[in-house]
Image (cartoon, coloured by chain):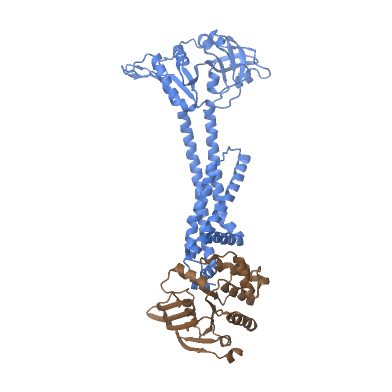
Chain colours: A brown, B blue
Amino acid sequence: MNEVIRTERISKYYQTGSFEVKAVDKVDLRVEEGEFLAIIGASGSGKSTFLNLIGCLDVPTEGEYYLDGVLVNGLSKNKLADIRNQKIGFVFQGYNLLSRTTALDNVELPLIYNRRDKIKNPKGLAIEALKKVGLEDRMYHDPSELSGGQQQRVAVARALVNNPAIILADEPTGNLDSKTSEEIIELFKSLNRQGVTIMLITHETDVAVHAQRVVEFKDGIIIRDEKQGKKQIAL
Amino acid sequence: MIGWKLIKISFESIGKNKLRSFLTILGIIIGVSAVIIMISIGLGAQREIEARIASLGTNLILVTPGTSSSGGVRQAAGSFSRLTIEDFDLLKKEATYLEGVSPVIMTRGQVIGGVGNWNTIISGVSMDYLTIRFWDVESGYSFTESDIKGKKKVCILGKTVAINLFPDSDPVGQKIRIRNVPFRVIGVLTEKGQSVGGSDSDDIIIAPYTTVKTRLSGRNFIPQIMCSAINSDFIDLAQEEVRELMRLSHNLDPYAGDQDNFTVRNQSEITEAQTESTQIMTTLLASIAGVSLLVGGIGIMNIMLVSVTERTREIGIRVALGARESDILTQFLVEAVVLSLFGGLLGIILGFGGIYLVEAISGMATAVDTDAILLAFSFSGVIGVLFGFLPARKAASLNPIDALQFQ
């Protein structure tokens, strides 16, 4: 199995006055290709900071971070931007779609900044991604014309479009009702079955139970890391 | 490749906020149109003054007698009249850069004829005079070589004189009496209007200088010789040539250190001064308008800065999805430049409308200058870069984590 993520004593410290806040403290974590991993923890446990580090939106104070076999520490801002573009697919709590922009154009957005691949038909790729989330009939709608669940599906399609190494989902069901939440979780599970590696952050335990593996953060360190049996997934 | 996509993004973003985009560029529109209108008005005034001076003859060279000194006391100009018919003949015969040469012998007198009498200036000149002054005969004809040789008592009336003496009839062929000397009217000059100095150019009678000299002025000397260069490029050469010929004619010895006892001047010196003053006016008008263009640029910066704050979340999303800082910078910079160039374009259209209005309402002369339009347009582009840079920098340097959490 290929290692998608490996952190070695990765840390993020903030200086507030004379106090040093250890948001993430010497965390070691390995995630293999095809895993569906849930990170849980109370607010302030450091899970969001950890996600920002994994998502290359933030740089660690200490420690090493390998993404898809590449050491990310010390890379230039431009290289980090390219990694975000090609290796990571973000799904946010608030969907974060561009307003007054069609679903199709939103999904196409990461392709615009893709400097690696010579993309001949960005529209085709975007439509393909929208098909994966079952929204091809809504592609010319603006976000304001879509329901919360549909918007989140567009966001998932956008995360998929560049074939990233991992999808990072930050509270993807936080703004959704329980029924829609389930649909989104089902979408993640089906994508995972197709081989997509997913790291999901949540504070809702009923969301976390769907993951194969649950990692719990508290005060910047991992206090629990266990694989869940097939029985539990079936529930 | 990515550059084109960024330009496309900028255009889309402008299109999505049409009203705000329009308000943003309003300052530029007004600024550019102000620059164009002001320069056109200034230039129009300049052209009009130039045209008036040209109507006097920009190729004009005047020879007047110099001053004399009597025991070290310098007398008034012309006090020692030394221009003679011989000077005129020599210039006429030898000068190569001159198109026309004419003596001018002016005298004022009462003219009787037609319905009454009139007091006017009588100019004794040669046939070249009309060419030199760009004057034309409206009806009748001008006098000929034989009229001059024969000292014929013929004359051409200026429009004002013609109207005052012959309000209802054609003066050509009529007899008039100038200081009791009978003259036959052979032509009427076309109307010239006011001169630059403000006097009436049409209040004049011209006649052969030979006739005026013997019949009216009775003096042997010529107060003035008027010449025109073959064209304005040769004006300096022509002036120098006239000076040389005049020195020859007056037997002035350069080795003995004889000074010129005459003055040669040309009209272009007056023209230059006049044009310079209108140029200063144009520059002044344009700089005032330029300030409004600058204010327009500050307006763009202002709205762009607000827009960056408003679109913080969008910027965060783009950065999270892999936009580099330079991509964000380019996007906002292109947006600012496109906005201001578009403003420039609308400003040009508005400017043309403004010029049309100014002409229609005030009757002021205007002249559209393509250079001014290009300048105003490219200046609006420069303003876009200049005032778009700060907001674009602000957008590019946003922290994506904060930007994504921005509400």
Task: For residue B306, say whether it is visible.
Answer: yes
Residue B293: x %, y % from top left: 52, 51
Identity of the residue furthest to the left in this view? B256
Q: Which quarter of the picture shows residue B71? A: top left
Of the pair A9 and B149, the residue shown nearer to us: A9
Note whether B194 is above or below B332 in the view shown.
above
What is the quadrant of the C terminus of chain B in the image? Answer: bottom right
Identity of the residue furthest to the front in this view? A1
Residue A59: x %, y % from top left: 43, 74
Residue A177: x %, y % from top left: 63, 82
Note whether B343 is above or below A158 in the view shown.
above
Note whether B92 is above or below A192 in the view shown.
above
Q: How many marks?
A: 0
Q: Which quarter of the picture shows residue B86? A: top left
Residue A100: x %, y % from top left: 62, 66
Q: Residue at x 43, y 24 (%)?
A: B237
